Every structure is written in structure tokens, then in C-alpha cells.
Amino acid sequence: MCGGFFSLFVHFLFSFGLACIIFFLSYILVLRIADIEKLSAYECGFSPFETTHTNFEVRYFLVALLFILFDLEVSFLFPWVCWAFIMIFFRIL
């Protein structure tokens, strides 16, 4: 029993170590050449009118969270409703 957990732990350590090595190597070996295109303000071609660090109202985030909640709820309930309709239609339920 412990042998299975030990091999799982070794696999986790190996995976974590490999991910860290790849991350740090990609950070070290990347070419950092700044040109005018990368340093420009926006892709649309004009500089911003005001600072981009403005506060958003909580209502926007609340609406987004509610949309995600009800969207997921519908996606989980739709197959169940279809299954229940089929069971009722064929008098199985």
C-alpha cells in the first residue's frame, strides 16, 4: 500500500521539478528585444485619454458571476431534464 503512494509522490515531485525547470529556463533564455511595436500604447493607434487604473463597480463583477452561475446551472440541468422527459415519455419513471 505504501509503495503505491511513494511512487505517486515521486511522480508528483518529478513533475513539479520538471515544470519549475522548464519555467525558469524559459524565463532565462527568452530574447528580450524591445521594439516600437511592443512599446506602443495600444494597437488601435492612439494614446489613451486617461489612466487605465480606474475603479470598476462591483455590480459588473456581480452580474458576471451570476451569469456564470446560471449558465453552469443550465448546462448541468439540461441533460437531467432531457433524461427525465424521456423516462416520463416512455413511462419508465
Image (cartoon, helix red, strand yellow):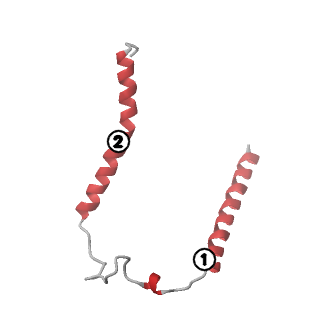
Q: Which residue is at 40% across, 25% downward?
A: 83
| Other residues around mark 2 within 10 Å, as few (<14) / some (14–19) / many (≥20) | few
What kind of residue is marked 2?
Answer: Glu
Q: How many marks?
A: 2
Residue 11 place in picture, x, y as percent = 71, 55
Q: Reading the chain from its start, which is encountered first: label 1 or label 2?
A: 1
- Residue 67 or residue 34, whichever sits in front: 34
Question: Residue 43, located in which quarter of the rendered image?
Answer: bottom left
Q: Which residue is at 37% across, 44% downward?
A: 72
What kind of residue is marked 1?
Answer: Tyr
Q: Is residue 65 shown above or below 75?
A: below
Q: Is residue 65 left or right of residue 14?
A: left
- Residue 87 or residue 4, whichever sits in front: 87
The label on residue 78 is: none
Residue 85 place in picture, x, y as percent = 35, 23
| Other residues around mark 1 within 10 Å, as few (<14) / some (14–19) / many (≥20) | few
Q: Label 2 near label 1: C-beta < 8 Å?
A: no
Q: Which residue is mark 2?
A: 73
- Residue 36 or residue 21, whichever sits in front: 36
Q: Which residue is at 63% across, 80% downward?
A: 28
Per the image, label 2 sits on a secondary structure element best described as helix
Q: Which residue is at 60% across, 77% downward?
A: 27
Per the image, label 1 sits on a secondary structure element best described as helix
* Furthest residue in direction right, as rendered: 3
* Furthest residue in direction top, as rendered: 91
Quadrant of image for the C terminus:
top left
Q: Is residue 50 shown above or below 90?
A: below
Q: Is residue 1 shown above or below 28?
A: above
- Residue 35 or residue 8, whichever sits in front: 35
Residue 1 place in picture, x, y as percent = 73, 43
Q: Which residue is mark 1?
A: 27
Question: Residue 89, located in which quarter of the rendered image?
Answer: top left
